[in-house]
Amino acid sequence: MIDMASDSRRRSTRRRLLDRSRFILLICAVVASGFAGRELFGEMHFLGARFAIRLVGIGLATVGIFTLKGPWAVRHAWPIAIGIVSAAYIMTALAGAVSPTHEYATAAVLFVGAALTTATVVPWGPGIQCLTVLVAAGVLAAAVLWKDGNLDAVTTDPGAAVVMAFVLSVVTAREFERYRAAHRRESRERQRADAALRQLNVRLEQRVAQRTAELEAANLRLAAEIVERRKAAEALQISQAQLADTVDHSTAMVALKDVGGRYLLVNREFERLLERPRAEVVGCTDHQLFADGLAERLSARDDEVLHGGAPISFEHELPVGEPPRAYVCVKFPLHGADGAVYGVGSMATDITLLKQLQEELRRHQDELAHVLRLHTIGEMAAALAHEINQPLCAIANYAQGGVHRLRAGTVDPDALLQAFEHIALEGLRAGQILRGIRGLVQREVEDETAVDVNTLAGEALRVLEPQARRHGVTVRLEGGSDLPPVHANAPQIEQVIVNLMLNGVQATAAAIGAPREVVVATTRSGENIEVAVSDRGEGIAPTVAGRLFSPFVTTKADGLGLGLAISRSIIENHGGRLWAMPNSGSGTTFRFSLPIAASAAPPA
């Protein structure tokens, strides 16, 4: 931009120089025309060489005035201007030199006027002005020397005046140049200031536009944020209203307490059960609302939550009807925005109906289990009858033998004692069988106690052994050593083992070419005792594999399809699990696990 401005200033100076040169040509043409007119129309007619020189000068000036308008002249403005002024001096001096009246004084006056004019009009400075003055002085001196043959006229007062005028023109040119330079500097400074101002204005406008755009964007963001916050506030209000409706219309008792145990919020279910409006409940403690015993238990639970910092759940009864209703309660800590606990929340759900249903289900399950036991005894009836008949026949035989010997009078005390001992052993044997059957089919509900799984498996094996012998199957117990007891209902677990062994015996008896053996094994696995019943039957059919433990699913023609379903239910009620898996060769292994009794488990 600076180079372009400098070039523009130089072109402007050259144009101004050409304009001033054309103005000088115009002055020369006018003055020459005046002199030529005087000579042509005056009293003295001097139409000689001087007149011709003036006509040539007028012609050249006129041609220059019109030809210096072209763009070519701008490129050569300085030499053209110097040439024009020098030519004017020469033509004027030449006209004075050829004058018949020796009027070089008039030429000197013209030179002085031309020098002063160029000094004030032409913008070329003192240097070029000196050059033109030297040209004028030289030409004038040449003209004087030519006319007079000497330069005495130069030393006269008029000559001194001419020299002083020439010097004054140089000084004037210098002052005008200084003025023009100052003007140019001022103009340049003004232009620079204007350019800087324009740039500043541009930057300012850009910054204003940028700030305006940023402000508009900020306003848009603010408006969008306001809309989002309004939407969030509305959504929060809706959410709070929905939460309040959910809490208020929940069938569970919902309450919030502060760390001092005072109620902060309760819902409608709480009001309904206590038959007190929430306005009376809020601000009260458990001791002001409930009996001392219940209030102490609830406060203890609150303290447990506050000190533990974690939710807890428990069951308890509330005296809010006849009979008292059972509730499962969940208590949890309430945390503020800073993470500090400021209270305890609680939700209590009425499970009275669920408890009743569970009790009914348990009774129904006991009835089904009893039916299953009777069905099992029915399947084993022939074998049990044969097994009981053997000791009875032995007892009868031993008794008849003793009677015959007594009647014959051949009593041998040792032989008679041996017969009585056999009678006693066979009686005990029959009693054990009957006790096992009675224990299996009894309906008395026994409490869960710590029992030995090996003992239960042995009892089940004795009950089932007659059925196994009838089918030609051997049953064998592989009891683990030093097994800790399990907490269980002994008759129920024995029933599970009997059901699994009976299924194994029947599956093995139906198989062809397989080892006719059923093995019951007991082992410890971590914190559980596992019981495995393995048979060598044909395995589980794919059609029933996925429904093996579902009720009423059976492959027996006279089966109920309840054995495995009830067995799994019994095991799961004891906190264990029952599953089946095929053997590597043939047959199936049924396994169930039971947790070790707490008193027998090693400390953690």
Image (tube, grey):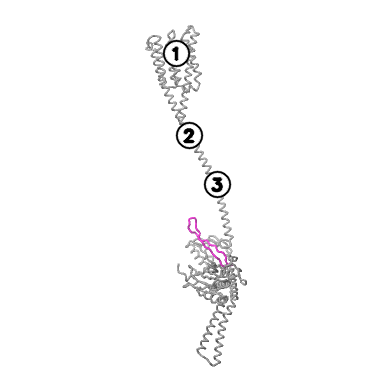
> For the C terminus, which image quadrant?
bottom left
- Image quarter for residue 370? bottom right
The crowding category of the residue bearing disc 3, from other C-alpha atoms within 10 Å (few below 14, some 14 to 19, many at least 20), is few
Report the disc number at residue 224.
Answer: 3
Mark 1 residue element: helix
Q: CA distance from mark 2 to mark 3?
A: 36 Å
Which is more toward the observer, 16 or 392?
392
What amino acid does circle 1 point to?
Thr
Q: Give the residue displayed 57% in from the left and 57% down from the top.
A: 244
Most common SS among magenta residues = strand
Question: Horizontal and vertical percent for residue 590?
Answer: 54, 69
Q: CA distance from mark 1 to mark 2?
A: 54 Å
Q: Is residue 194 left or right of residue 506?
A: left
Check disc 2 and report the residue beneath it. 199
Q: Nearer the viewer, mark 1 or mark 2?
A: 1
Mark 3 residue element: helix
Check disc 1 and report the residue beneath it. 92
- Kindly check if marks 1 and 2 are in contact, taking CB atoms under 8 A apart as contact: no
Mark 2 residue element: helix
Q: Is residue 289 visible?
A: yes
Q: Nearer the viewer, mark 3 or mark 1?
A: 1
Residue farthest to the front? 513
Which is more toward the observer, 587 or 452?
587
- Kindly check if marks 2 and 3 are in contact, taking CB atoms under 8 A apart as contact: no
What amino acid does circle 3 point to?
Ala
Instruction: Give the mark nearer the N terminus: 1 vs 2.
Output: 1
Q: Which residues are magenta?
A: 325-354
The crowding category of the residue bearing disc 2, from other C-alpha atoms within 10 Å (few below 14, some 14 to 19, many at least 20), is few
Instruction: Give the mark nearer the N terminus: 3 vs 1.
Output: 1
Residue farthest to the bottom? 409
Query: Does residue 560 lie above or below 71 as drawn?
Result: below
Which is more toward the observer, 401 or 217?
401
